[in-house]
Amino acid sequence: MHSVIRSIVLTWQLGMGCAVAALADGVTPDDAGRRLLEAYPEMIAGVEDGQIVWRGGGRMTIDDGRGTKSFEDLIEKPDLQDIFAITYPDGDPSPPGFNADPGRARPESFFERMYGDCRTGGVEKNLVEVPWMPSRTRQTLKVTRVNGVAERLAAISTELERLPKFYDVFLHPVGGTFACRAIAGSQQRSTHGYGIAIDLAVKPSHYWRWSKPDAQGRYAWRNSIPFEIVRIFEKHGFIWGGRWYHFDTMHFEYRPELLIK
Ligand SMILES: [Zn+2]
C-alpha cells in the first residue's frame, strides 16, 4: 500500500496535475457493494444490479457514472464507489502521500440514510451516553447506537483503560463527539453530526489547518498519538484522521467499510 502511495506522490511530483485517477485503487462497484454489505449488515440487505439494497426498502446506486473525479469532487461529490478510491493503510503511522485522505469521501445521502439528519433531529433520537474510561475520568460521550457504534466505543474505552497511565494525556479530556456542524472550511457535514466520530484530547493533537504550508503549498504531516491507541480504535471499526494528508490526529470515526480487505 505504501509503495502505491509513494508512486502516486512521485507521479504527482512529475507533474501529472490533478491525476486522482492515480489515486484510485481500482475497486469495482461490485467490490464496493460487497464491502458496504459486510460493514453494515444491519442496514444493507444485499447488492444487486450495481446498487445496494436497503433493509428498510429502497436502493442506492454505487457508481454515479461520472468517471474519475478530481480530488475536490471526490470529497465534495462522492458516490459509494468513491469511498474506496484511496486505500486505507494499515501498520505503523507514516506520512500520507499528497491528498491521500482515505475516508474523507463520504456520500451524504448514504450516511444520512443510516444515521439521520442532525439538522432536523434525526440523529439525536439515537444518541446514547457512553461512560469514557470510567476508572480514570467522569466524562460521558454522546454517540449513536445505530450500527452498534455506542457498544463499540464502550469496548474501546475498556481496552484503553488497560494502557499505562502514560497514555492518558492523549485520551482525556475528550475534545468532543456529537456536534451538528459542517467540516471547518467546507460545506460538507462533519461525521460528528452523525454521532459516529470522536476527537481525543485536543492539546497533544495535530491538525493540518493549524499548521502552515511550505513554499510549494504542501503540509508536513505531524503526529504524536501513539500507535497503540490507533490500533485499538481500528480493531473496532474506527478509522483515524492521522492517516490523512489533511491530518487530524485527534479524530476517529466509525467507518468499518474501509478496514475490510
Ligand atoms: Zn473530529
Image: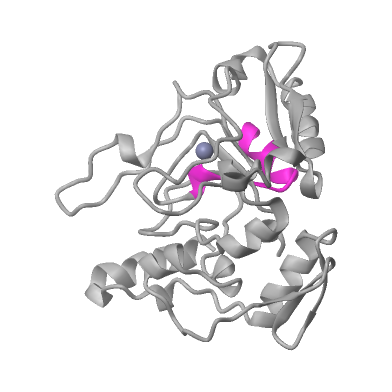
The image shows residue 72 at horizontal and vertical percentages of: 36, 65
The image shows residue 204 at horizontal and vertical percentages of: 45, 23
Q: Is residue 242 magenta?
A: yes
Residue 239 is at least partly visible in this image:
no
Residue extending furthest toward the left: 215
Please report the bounds of the magenta region as a residue range.
Answer: 228-243
Measuring 24% from the left and 73% from the top, which residue is drawn there?
14
Q: Quadrant of residue 52?
A: bottom right
Q: Quadrant of residue 137?
A: top right
The image shows residue 195 at horizontal and vertical percentages of: 65, 41
20 sits to left or right of 120: left
Viewer-side residue, 104 vs 22: 104
15 lies above or below 233: below
87 sits to left or right of 42: left
Majority secondary structure of magenta residues? helix
Residue 252 is at least partly visible in this image:
yes
164 sits to left or right of 5: right
Q: Dividing the image into 4 quarters, which one contains the C terminus?
A: bottom right
The image shows residue 158 at horizontal and vertical percentages of: 79, 25
